[in-house]
Image (cartoon, coloured by chain):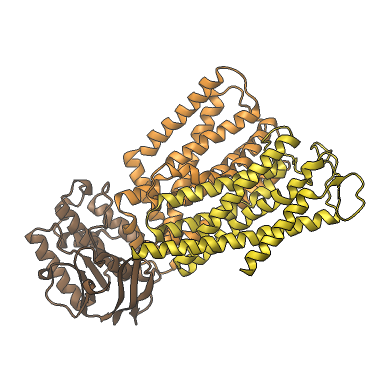
Amino acid sequence: MILKGALGVLLTLVIIAAFALPITPQPQSWLEFPLIPGLEEKARIIFFHVPTAWLSVMAFLTSMVFGIRYLRKRDMLDDIRSSSAAGLGLLFCILATATGAVWAKFNWGSFWNWDPRETSIFVLLLIYGAYFSLRSAIEVEEKRATLSSVYSIIAAVTVPFFVFIMPRIMTGLHPGAKGDPDGAGPVIEFKMSPNMRVVFFASLIAFTLLFVWMFTLRVRAARLESHLQAKG
Amino acid sequence: MQPDERYGRRWLRATSAVFLKDWHAELRTRYAINALGMFVVTTISIILFSLGGEPASPEVLAGMLWVVLFFAAMSGMSRTFVMEEERGTAMTLQLQAPASAVYFGKLLFNLVLGAGLTLLTVVLYAVLIEGFVIRSYGVFIGVVTLGSIGLAAASTIIAAIIARANTKGTLYPVLSFPILLPLLMTVINATRLASEGTSWADAGGEFQILISYIVVVVTTSYLLFEYIWKD
Amino acid sequence: MAIRIHAEGLRQVFSRRTIFSGISFSVSGAGVLLIAGRNGSGKSTLVKILCGVLTPTAGWARIESDGAQDQFGRKAMIGLVAPYLQLYEEFSAMENLRMSMNLRGYRPSDDVSRGLLDRVALDAQRQDPVRGFSSGMKQRLKYAMALVHRPSILVLDEPMSNLDADGTAIVRSIMHEQRTAGILVVATNDLTDIDGWDTEVNLNAAR
């Protein structure tokens, strides 16, 4: 209850701050964001898009950790936790992809450009898709839990390779990306001012709390469902 | 009749028995030799028809080579595990040999299968597709060797998963693709470099990635295989 | 060498359906364990747990032996004959046995294989591919396969399935030998299959 209330207040404040505070070339007070050339009003996306992407990665790791726990303890509750986290991860992954694509259309001119981070989120989408196809293909719950846990671990150990591969193959377009040496991307320099940083990190915390709240809700619902099925 | 004294030798005997079983079964049915050979021929013909004599860039051709190899692996490498489940012999194997011996025996079989597939594909590709030129032979051979090892390593563990899931072939590429993507991106890039002409030093990063990918995938598979193999 | 199977609090659940729970027993060699229960009561599931190919949802089943531990663990001590255990049909009886010895880490011996095939009266068909065998012949070969490594525990699930009178007699003599040499575990519905037992696990009452 306290969590839900705090989350409500925090998210409301973040949304108001992110949308209502004006962006001006020469900020006079704490309540004005500086103008970033090349981004202008579109800079506001950072308050929502980045936390969403962050959550989809965190949900993947959460799912994997509970998967490992299932393999060690064989407790079906851990599988429920693992798949609930993955379900939320997929949701946030789709949201991050969609918000990013819309923003890219206005900033870079097309919805999709195979920039390293776009590729990463695409791979994450593929993994989530594969994970849920695998789950839906197996009927025995114990087997489903084991195999999907193993799959998420294998996926998790191969994903870090992209960190080394991406820079060798493509240049980055994302604001602040390293592979953008001669200003090939539309945004040359991206630094958040202190007040943007406050809103940004507040949003990051709010989204994390949102994830925790949605996660506990889903786990509770899944547990109730499994109790009902066991009785009926 | 006594078991071999040392565990290592006994384990090696069991591992090679797993490999030889699949190998002899393959020699009798010649499934892989016939069906996969035809698969490669068919796919390369489709590429030839679709190119229609037009020259294609080295980037495109390097990518196409690995598209053929990826799908050839996807159509052949699940068989070693799927057959055990379909015929009900998985438990027979489970009761006799240690799980690690089964894993490495099957991996070895897929490595041999992958080597054969790669050799056939590369030879046909080089002979039939005109624009495909290799300037750095050493680098190319290195990339193709490591690529085929990596392909077999990742395909083997995913094959073990889908065999248990009783989903036959449909899920195989779906599950394998995200796992294989880092490998495919690296080998495609390295093949392009080899066809443009590059030195060992310039392709060194690619080789580092390929070798560590193989090590990571095989180690993880070895650690997790028992969970998949045991009910 | 004394050997003992000891199980405590075994419970198996598949997709929230409890197959059995609260199964505890212990049997020492030389002895016979009977696993009884109607169809679907989980006889085969319990057999798989004993053989170590299935991890139970709760509880444990151990094999305690005061002899030297085999490097291959439980596999080396157990021989199983069961309807769901299949042979490699593209190979001959001899090849199946040879393969089994290799898989178990033994140096294969044709004399041992011939001896086993002679025991189950398949010596004449030893070079024929198993694909052409009748189901009774396959069942006999499964006995030869289960005895390759002289297991101290022989586990039989539906021991007489598909066997004719001669086959039944062979199996009875194998059972007789095993019950004096080690532990015999029989899972069956038909009590005429077995000439008495020391411990009984009845799965009908174990939900």
Residue sitting nearer the eye, B86 or B148: B86
Q: Please tell me in which quadrant of the rendered image residue C184 appears.
A: bottom left
Chain that is yellow in the image = A
Q: Work out whether residue A67 can be spotted.
A: no
Q: Work out whether residue A228 can be spotted.
A: yes
Q: Is residue C140 left or right of residue A190?
A: left
- Residue A99 drawn at (x, y percent): 67, 43
Q: Is residue A93 left or right of residue B153?
A: right
Q: Please tell me in which quadrant of the rendered image residue B230 appears.
A: bottom left
Residue lying at the far top in this picture: please name it: B53
Q: In the rendered image, which quarter contains the C terminus of chain A?
A: bottom left
Residue sitting nearer the eye, A109 or B115: A109
> How many circles with numbers are drawn on the protein?
0
Q: In the rendered image, which quarter contains the N terminus of chain A?
A: bottom right
Q: Is residue C159 left or right of residue A1?
A: left
Name the tint of chain B in the rendering.
orange
Chain that is brown in the image = C
